[in-house]
Image (spheres, helix red, strand yellow):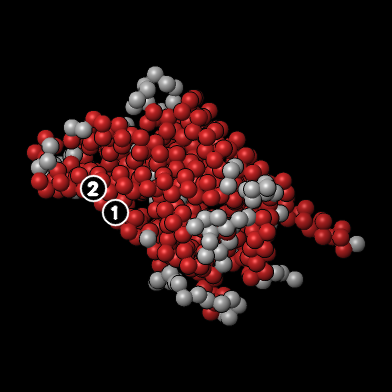
Amino acid sequence: MKPSVDDVIDQEAGHEAQDLKRGLKDRHIQLIAIGGAIGVGLFLGSAKAIHQAGPALILSYAVAGLAVFFIMRALGELLVHRPVAGSFATYADAYVSPWAGFVTGWTYWFTWIVTAMAELTAIGVYVHYWFPQVPQWAPALVALVLLYGVNLIAVKVFGELEFWFAIIKVVTIVGMLILGLAVICFGVSDLGKTASFSNLWSHGGFSPVGMVGVVLTLQIACFAYTGVELIGVTAGEAENPKEVLPHATNSVTYRILVFYIGALAIIMSLMPWDEINPGMSPFVQVFEKIGIPLAAGIINFVVITAAASSCNSGIFSTGRMLYTLAQSKQAPAMVGKVSSRHIPATAITISAICMLLGVVLNYLVPEEVFTYVTSVATVGSIWTWGIIVWAHMKYRRAVAAGEVEGVDYRMPGTPFSNWFVLIFLALVLIFLALDASTRVALYVAPVWFILLTIGYKMLSTSKSAQLAEQAR
């Protein structure tokens, strides 16, 4: 007899209640939610994106941001329904199919592995600002070792580190916005002579390279938002999850408007888009132009912490996802064990070892590694986000059929908003094929999903054989 959706989710919740510790407080979750959306995609990837699309990049981030808003509201509704660490992997298993749960869990693990590689790459790039003689791989290795150690201590330590990482990022961006507005409106500093909102349309127009630029930067915008769904993975270790998680989910709209669209609009108003160096953080360039060298160094430090924050989240989330897969008997049992500190230490260690590949890539192809890994991570995020809205639609159907209870916190516009997100994500996949540097992701993705399907079939065959043997 097939277990009900509630049975599937409640089984995982039972494991978590015994193994994991709810050590993440309200302030941790709120700042993890904010910090999850602010990373290398904004501080490093936006420079290349500005060069590709000009001011029309704002449109790319706005459209992608609307899709992410609906994704987060769908996830928020599911989290209020059942707050478990497996999150979307568990919902995929319960509401779509066991195959979907298996593929989603492993794909999300893989996505954060390559995302952490991108963040480690960014750390190496930013350290070059101060120490150009240091090889790019060395700072990446040091950061990985330190963050791995932090994640083995306790979930509360992870939460505290992310809290302060997020505070640094938020204060810096807000400070840049205030200073930027002062330069534009009151002519502060020498940059004030040329800074103007008219820079958004006076250098070849708002879309100087046409809609092609918008299309080609959608994958960068999607990668920039990678991590907003992280609050779903924290659900199994959050205090009062049904109260905290909706508040964190609702804040996604403000994060998108202020930290991405607002920041990009100010940057391209302070400096014409065609004067921004695509190989250097636009934040650093702006402060150098204003004439505050010390501030440029501070910004460089901030973007290093942003990259470290995202890598820290990657170690946390990959460890929890491997733990969840093990509890569902979809990963080796050894990774489903927790330490005396209630930490899935074995799962974290295996994930960190895999992230070492990012250090190797920084040694072998330091120039191309960032584009490669961001493209692959985007495909993984697209799958995860698509599964979230698909599982949400199936959940709503289960509610309508009286199979499960609904909740008051709901995603607006269902099912139309769900289909908007799915169509948008499909278009982003198509657009990846238009750029040779991002096309590599479309070569890797089919191989990955074929391997996962083979693994799932082998696992299912093994389980069937075990059940048949027990029946005898």
Instruction: Check the picture and name the quadrant holding the N terminus.
Output: bottom right
Please tell me how crowded label 2 is: few (under 14), some (14-19), or many (20+) other residues with Cα within 10 Å.
many
Q: Nearer the viewer, residue 125 or 17?
A: 17
Which badge, 1 or 2, comes first in the chain's sequence?
A: 2
Q: Are marks 1 and 2 in contact (CB under 8 Å)?
A: yes
The numbered mark at residue 258 is: 1
- Which residue is at 66% across, 43% downward? 346
- Asked whether the viewer can see residue 97, the reply is no
Question: Of the residues shown, which amino acid type is indicated by label 2?
Answer: Leu
- Which residue is at 49% across, 46% downward? 313
Q: Is residue 68 left or right of residue 460?
A: left
- Which residue is at 48% across, 67% downward? 243
Which percent across, then down, holds residue 230? 49, 53
* SS label for mark 1: helix
The residue beneath circle 2 is 177
Instruction: Check the picture and name the quadrant holding the C terminus.
Output: bottom right
425 versus 367 height, above or below: below
Q: Is residue 9 left or right of residue 190?
A: right
